[in-house]
Amino acid sequence: MSEQIERIKTLIIGSGPAGYTAAIYAARADLKPVVYTGMEPGGQLTTTTEVDNFPGYPEGIDGPTMMVQLQQQAERFGTDVRIGMATAVALSDEVGGIHRVTIDNAKEIEAETIIISTGASAKYLNLPSEQRLRGGGVSACAVCDGFFYKGQEVAIVGGGDTAAEEASYLANICKKVTMLVRKDHMRASKAMQHRVNNLDNIEIRYNTEVDEVLGEQVVEGLRMVNNQTGEKEDIPITGLFIAIGHTPNTGIFKGQLDMDETGYIITESGSTKTNKPGVFASGDAQDKIYRQAVTAAGTGCMAALDAERYLASIETATPVAQ
């Protein structure tokens, strides 16, 4: 049975900007990378209509097209891109050890190095109207999409530091920002609360939730509901930003890789190395601060270089005398 198990030099799990950039660098280094795309080939950018802040696209580009081009670039250098999802892993503790990965609960493969680029999924409210208008005015990233609503009225949902920071960002470019906080207080730090409260064009609605996002093709308004009184109110907006957190897609690595309390993979400072030799993490699976396509691509590059150096160190290592 073991003779039938495929051996891969560099396995890349995930296919967003981090995964494909890692593949480009790994392929050029002759690491013969294999990419398994996961459930959402191309990652979160495939749900983004316009990408205006990635270098090299002066006129902007839509997310799906950008990810197709990244895949094509990776394939041009010999990357083997496969549809499939890693469903289980057994990571070696030994330098030069072989890692085992199960794909789609069926196929087992072996890898000398693994680059994890599984990303993180934004949390949404899961309202039908919200899901229908994702990409049509509903976004989970104000820094990514806020520019498109310059001078307009928008709303943001959330009460933590991320929501407060994104509300402040939006307030600098938008006419008005309505902030919906589910409780009677914000969870954000005092410093962030002070920043939000000092901005004249931010209106905070406490004990308030989204009842429905209004609009057919694009966001045209928001129906809010006070969760204490049940009173509903409609306001005109063109953009709705959801800032209630992200969930890193790292579940299959729990118990084997060091993670923080929310599931983000911990890497060594200044590198993409995890606590397992030959296993590297890049992109939003290990970055809960920036979460941008360009920073994900940067760490994908780092992971491929780290993998190349790791393999080179094993090949040139002198055996220890017994």
Image: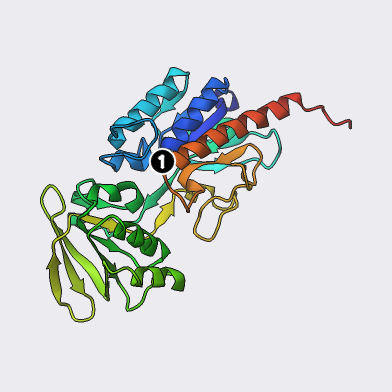
Residue ranking furthest to the right: 322
Residue 314 location (% of width, % of height): 72, 29
Residue drawn at x 32%, y 79% as measured from the top left: 184
Q: Is residue 231 left or right of residue 287?
A: left
Q: Is residue 281 visible?
A: yes
In the rendered view, would you say 38 is above or below 197?
Answer: above
Q: How many marks?
A: 1
Name the kind of residue labelled 1 in the image. Answer: Ala
In the rendered view, would you say 135 is above or below 240?
Answer: above
Residue drawn at x 11%, y 54% as measured from the top left: 215
Q: Is residue 172 left or right of residue 316?
A: left
Q: Secondary structure at mark 1?
A: helix
In the rendered view, would you say 88 is above or below 98?
Answer: below
Nearer to us in this view, 282 or 108? 282
Residue drawn at x 49%, y 28% as measured from the top left: 23
Residue 126 location (% of width, % of height): 26, 57
In the rendered view, would you say 221 is above or below 319?
Answer: below
Residue drawn at x 29%, y 42% as measured from the top left: 48
Residue 191 placement: quadrant:
bottom left
Residue 226 location (% of width, % of height): 21, 75
Q: Quadrant of the C terminus?
A: top right
Nearer to us in this view, 135 or 202? 202
Residue 135 location (% of width, % of height): 23, 45
Residue identified by numbered label 1: 293
Q: Is residue 170 left or right of residue 130?
A: right
